Amino acid sequence: MNQRLVLKRKLLVEEPKPIPDIIRREYDICVLQKHGVKIIRLGQTWKLIFPGDDLFDNDTAEINNDYKPLLAVAADFLQTYSKISVEVASYSNRMNDDVRTKFGTVTDELTTRQAESVMNYLTTRRINARLIYAVGKGGQDPVAWNGSPEGRRLNRRVEVSFRYYRNSTAWY
């Protein structure tokens, strides 16, 4: 009597299950807050506030290489939502000796380049370029008094804010 043994193949490594968005969001929020990013949620709007001194090299629009992984986490967080729009706004402290140019002040131009730099990085991390825009605010909307070093540090910041749809369907 010949019996054939049929061996079933069993996968040694199974495909990982996708992480639910709600768990992914909680993890991303913890990582961002641990590294000094302030997070504000109001209704369907999120705002991520990055300290400008850490994000950029001194008085440049170049993103610090040590900070790029944190921006990647922020991009992952944004991807868990169906977004309406994403605004990247860069701010500085208002300096009295700021040089005026034809298009505003030197600080205004620097903050515009910084916002565009963050926007470009986020688009490389699969954020839809049609939904994101950059704004350089210069010394507008200070959050602290510029008379102290701590106040000037707090005013140098980049805010990434977005609105999202309540349901998971996005219409383009």
Image (cartoon, rainbow, N blue to C red):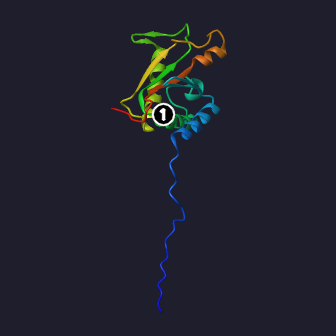
Which corner quadrant of the image does residue 67 belong to?
Answer: top right
Amino acid beneath label 1: Leu
- Residue 59 percent coordinates (x, y): 54, 22
Which corner quadrant of the image does residue 50 belong to?
Answer: top right
User: Total of numbered circles in the picture?
Assistant: 1
Q: Residues within 10 Å of mark 1 (few under 14, many from 20)?
A: many
The one of 13 and 111 positioned closer to us in this rendering: 13
Lateral position of residue 28 relative to residue 89, left or right: right
- Residue 133 percent coordinates (x, y): 41, 25
Vertical placement of residue 156 versus 169, above or below: above
| Quarter of the rendering occupied by the C terminus | top left
The one of 104 and 161 positioned closer to us in this rendering: 161
The residue wearing badge 1 is: 78
Residue lying farthest to the top in this orientation: 96
Lateral position of residue 171 relative to residue 110, left or right: left
Residue at the spot 42% in from the left edge and 38% down from the top edge:
126
Residue at the spot 66% in from the left edge and 12% down from the top edge:
148
- Residue 80 percent coordinates (x, y): 48, 37
The one of 27 and 150 positioned closer to us in this rendering: 27
Element type at mark 1? helix
Residue lying farthest to the left in this orientation: 172
